[in-house]
Image (cartoon, helix red, strand yellow):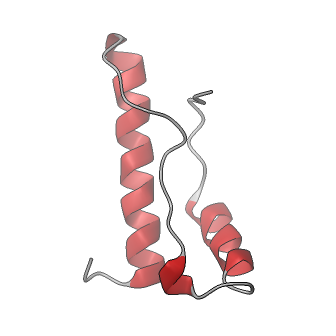
Amino acid sequence: MSNSTVENVDGLAARIDVAATIMDVDDIAISTNGGFHVVGSAAAESEHAKLQLVEMVARYVWGNEL
């Protein structure tokens, strides 16, 4: 089920750190928790914010050269 709440960078980075204790950090992936659909601008704004967060965390954890 999709959730419109946008998590924070530190929280996601901490979860990646925990996962990295059991697997190589280069084998970890992050993504949003739902698909995309066209229903109103509020949903689109939330989806855009989540994608920006995924990019920001990926650049923080894996570097700027994506």
Check the image and report above or below for 41 versus 59.
above
| Residue 11 sits in quarter | bottom right
Q: Residue at the spot x=36%, y=84% of the render?
A: 63
Q: Quadrant of residue 62?
A: bottom left
Residue located 54% across and 74% down the image: 28
Check the image and report above or below for 20 versus 30.
below
Where does the image place residue 22, in percent across and percent down from the top left? Answer: 74, 84
Q: Nearer the viewer, residue 54 or 20?
A: 20
Left or right of 27 on screen, residue 54? left
- Tell me: 37 left or right of 23: left
Please provide percent x and percent y for residue 41.
Answer: 33, 17
Residue under the image location 49 percent in, 46 percent down:
32
- The number of numbered discs placed on residues in the rendered structure image is 0
Q: Residue 10 occupies which quadrant of the picture?
A: bottom right
- Residue that lies at the very extreme toward the left in this rendered image: 65
Image quarter hosting the C terminus: bottom left
- Position of the N terminus, as image quadrant, is top right
Counting from the top left corner in percent of width and height, residue 42 is at: 41, 19
